[in-house]
Image: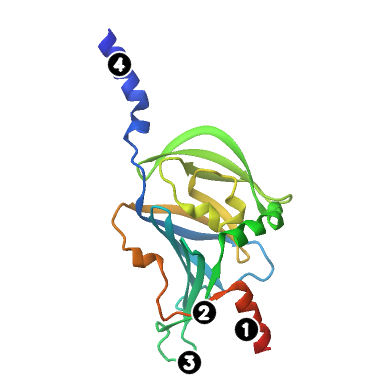
Amino acid sequence: MKNWLWLLLATLTLPGWTQKAFNEGIVRFQADTVRRVDAHPAVFIVTERTIFKKGDLARIEITRVNRITGGQKHRQIEIRNRKGILLCSESPWQESNDPSRPTRSATMLLSYDEEKARLPFIQNKIHTVSRTGARTKRLGLWAEKIILQGPAGEEPTEALVTASIDIPLSLSFDALRTVGNTPLEFSIREYGWLTRYRAVGIERRKLPDAFFEVNASQKIMTMEQMLKELQDFK
């Protein structure tokens, strides 16, 4: 009888015991455009978002595609390391006949204190979370279904979050800062579109430290320096 009870207990709690900490690797998200939410949405729409994680280091790559031509691609890169948050972008080379040849703009360095200073100004964008208690599995991870409610006038949306892995995805979306756990599926308004993100791959692998730095030849500027350069340009 005791053996049967122990077996039953192990069956009920096994999912929690078998999850491994996600300290290093890659998580890939597919992005699907649901509908337009602004009168004049961006020409480029997000098609994928990839998160690279190594301990406290993170690199987030966002690929956007020209929805009209379907060919031009624009990539944004966000690196979080001990120096702060590095933001840079790659866009199609405008002066070349080869659209695949990229050019990279200057990289902006944002301190973590500067990021915190933004919080009072984005409170109206942050979604409230309603727990449902419903659980399911996504990519082998236990996840909970939650309801996200945005500002007044926006329809609530469903999301799946997991406590099995910890990646800084929520920091890239002001609306998700109160979610707590890692989102595996969610909808978000960005660039004038409602976009549905869905985790499609998780790969545990070693990543080089250099991957969480920008190229040494790349010009790095603070927000103040970048704003001054824009003023001088005018």
Say whether disc 3 or disc 4 marks the residue closer to the N-terminus: 4
Secondary element under disc 1, as helix, strand or loop, is helix
Placement of 166 over or under 229, stated as above or below: above
Q: Amino acid at mark 1?
A: Glu
Q: Earlier in the sequence, mark 2 or mark 3?
A: 3
Q: Name the quarter where the C terminus is drawn.
A: bottom right
Q: Quadrant of residue 228?
A: bottom right
Q: Residues within 10 Å of mark 3 (few under 14, many from 20)?
A: few
* Dot 1 or dot 3, earlier in sequence: 3
Relative depth, front residue between 65 and 5: 5
**Separation (CA) of disc 2 from disc 3:** 18 Å
Q: CA distance from mark 3 to mark 4?
A: 69 Å
Residue, far left = 3
Label 1 Cα crowd, 10 Å radius (few <14 / some 14-19 / many 20+): few
Q: Amino acid at mark 3?
A: Glu
| Residue 205, image x, y percentages | 29, 55
Is the residue under label 1 in contact with that under label 2 (CB below 8 Å)?
A: yes
Q: Which mark is residue 95?
A: 3
Mark 2: few, some, or many residues within 10 Å (few <14, many ≥20)? some
As drawn, the label of residue 229 is 1
